Image (spheres, helix red, strand yellow):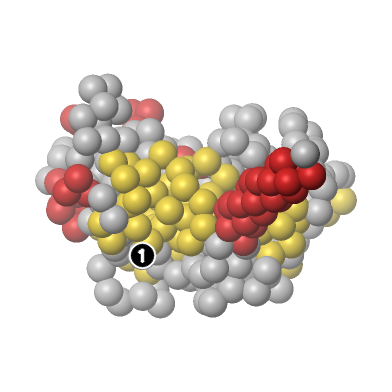
Amino acid sequence: MQRVIEYLFRSILCVVLLLTGWALLRIFVCDQFVVPSESMSPTLIAGDRILANKLVAGARIYKKIEFGKDIPLRSFRMPGLREVRPNDVVIFNAPRGYDRGRIEFRINYVYTKRCIGAPGDSISIREGYFHNNRHTAPIGNLDQQRRLNRTPDSLIPRKVLRTIPFDDRNFGWTIRNMGPLYVPQAGVRVRLDSLNWKLYRQVIEYETGAKLKYADGILRLDGNPLAEYTFRQNYYFFCGDNVSDSKDSRYLGFVPEEFIIGVVRRISYSEEPYTGRKRPDRWWKRVE
């Protein structure tokens, strides 16, 4: 009887240790996600299982395990190997978690896109091609950008063509031509005017919890005049490689650094989502 009890105890202990090890691996090192759409095609396609490497930027650790509407994210980040940089493929929480026109955290609302701009960069799109003032190498998939370059505006639906800040009179930005746009960096102060406040409204309201409004020639934050603002956090600008069909920062705006989950390095496994057909040619494929 004693041997049976010892065997059961050891078996239970092994199971507990395995589950604990698996949980720690997912929290601190790596986690797997499924690609649901073609927004990152051809780099990633629907049905790919991708690995989020949390060692690169550092694992995000929650201070408070309570999630829902109007509950802010409370977390800190472990030391990472380096910062996220342009051309990294990144998994992150969507900046408009509840699609209410503001930056909100939603734990199970996750996107995978490519970094176009890091904190302190100025990014732009010129005739369909991405540009970054501090990154001279090509960014993203040039074949997809070339196809967008050759597509007339008349063939692109208006709701797809227009981008932030959706102000046709003063900006007129589209997925073919937008910017330059400065990506907020913590500690940097910007002067605000009758135009650029629209670009940073969501960021300022997210950081302060106050409402930003422009009326009678004066910009006010919760009623108090605001002529300049110092960013408190770092932000990123992410876009899909399939530039003609991707819901990303061109429509949603900047992504807070604390929303980043990990950097994608590998496709672990892949199968056709509707038929279940295995795609071994994509297994353990490096993501670049």
On the image, the x and y values in percent for residue 120 come to 54, 72
Instruction: Return the x and y of residue 144 as percentages of the image width and height.
Output: 19, 49
User: Visible in this render: residue 183?
Assistant: no
Q: The disc labelled 1 sits on which kind of residue? A: Asn
Q: What residue is at 53 percent from the left and 76 percent from the top?
A: 82
Mark 1 element type: loop
User: Which quadrant of the rendered structure holds the N terminus?
Assistant: top right
In the displayed structure, 52 sits above or below 247; it is: below
Q: Residue at x 36, y 65 (%)?
A: 87
- The residue at the far top in this view is 274
Q: Which residue occupies the foreground of this view, 195 or 52?
A: 52
Instruction: Say which residue appears at 47% left-offset and 55% top-offset.
Output: 52
Rendered location of residue 183, percent (x, y): 53, 63
Left or right relative to 231: residue 117: left
Instruction: Identify the residue under disc 1.
Output: 87
Work out whether 193 lies above or below 275: below
Please identify the residue farthest to the front as the structure is shown.
1
Which residue does the image show at 30% across and 59% down from the upper left?
Answer: 287
